[in-house]
Amino acid sequence: MATRSTTTVVLYTIVCMLLSVVVAAQANDFGGGKLKETNLMVEACKNASSYSLNPDNVTQEFCLSTLQSNNRSFEAKDLNSLVLITIDILKGRITPARGKVEKMLQNAKKGTVTMRALSFCKLDYDGMVRVLNICDAMIRDYHGDNSGLPSFELPRCVERVMIPAENCGSELDRDMPGAEALVNENAELVMLVNLNYALLAQYDDN
Ligand SMILES: *[C@@H]1O[C@H](CO)[C@@H](O)[C@H](O)[C@H]1NC(C)=O
Ligand SMILES: *[C@@H]1O[C@H](CO)[C@@H](O)[C@H](O)[C@H]1NC(C)=O
Ligand SMILES: *[C@@H]1O[C@H](CO)[C@@H](O)[C@H](O)[C@H]1NC(C)=O
């Protein structure tokens, strides 16, 4: 009798373990390929939605959908790892924007406002990537406030990328033929810069 109930308990336990493995697998791979956001992603985006470099706060929806666009987000173990991913996402968007600017520059007439705007935008985009590389290294080398760099330097590093992004936007805002796509693309870059800042902004509180 005692043996049988022990066996039952063991079997029951095994069935439960198997079930939870199946449930966990489904939770991770739900809807055939679409991963479910982690608690860290949700919490980071919730926190980020209180901050912005613009009048409009970063929305949780924009934050989550941006993170979800890179599968590494689902494996991130802390906030800083998430920001390294959003920096990569931003850099990945600057590259094609810069490519378009470069292409238009080749066809632009010399000595025109268009030529000037595109030249400065190219410079702005190059500068943004350089600053982001510095921020990336800064975040990787940050191991707590006692490691030599106060944490408020992290959001302030990313914040520096906003000025060139906005400069390019205001250059392009002129009535330039074919600039609409660039203007829209630049507006998206500004939103991504804002997100990068907002994710780190809690460090800027004190
Ligand atoms: C992300 O993961 C999902 C689910 O595993 C997969 O279907 C998708 O192809 C992956 N995307 C990339 C860009 O790796
Ligand atoms: C969110 O904010 C709370 C309160 O400030 C903080 O304790 C927590 O660590 C933050 N979480 C993330 C992922 O930033
Ligand atoms: C941004 O979020 C903060 C904190 O939740 C809130 O106090 C502020 O009103 C928000 N600003 C805007 C423009 O939504």
Image (tube, grey):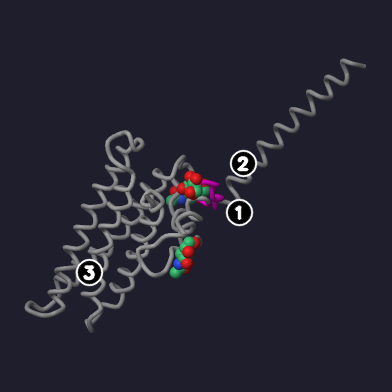
Q: Which residue lies furthest to the right in this view?
A: 1
| Part of the protein shown in magenta | 34-42
Q: Which of marks 2 and 3 is nearer the N terminus?
A: 2
Residue that badge 2 annotates? 25
SS for callout 3:
helix
Residue beneath label 1, please? 31
Dots 1 and 3: beta carbons under 8 Å? no
Would residue 23 be found to the left or right of residue 191 on screen?
A: right
Q: Distance between the residues labelled 2 and 1?
A: 12 Å
Provide the residue designation for mark 3: 167
Label 3 crowd (10 A; few <14 / some 14-19 / many >=20) = some
Q: Check disc 1: other Cα within 10 Å, few if <14, some if 14-19, many if 20+.
A: few
Q: Position of residue 54 (x, y in %)?
A: 36, 67
Which amino acid, mark 2?
Answer: Ala
Dot placed on the residue nearer the N-terminal end, 2 or 1: 2
| Residue 134: x %, y % from top left | 24, 47
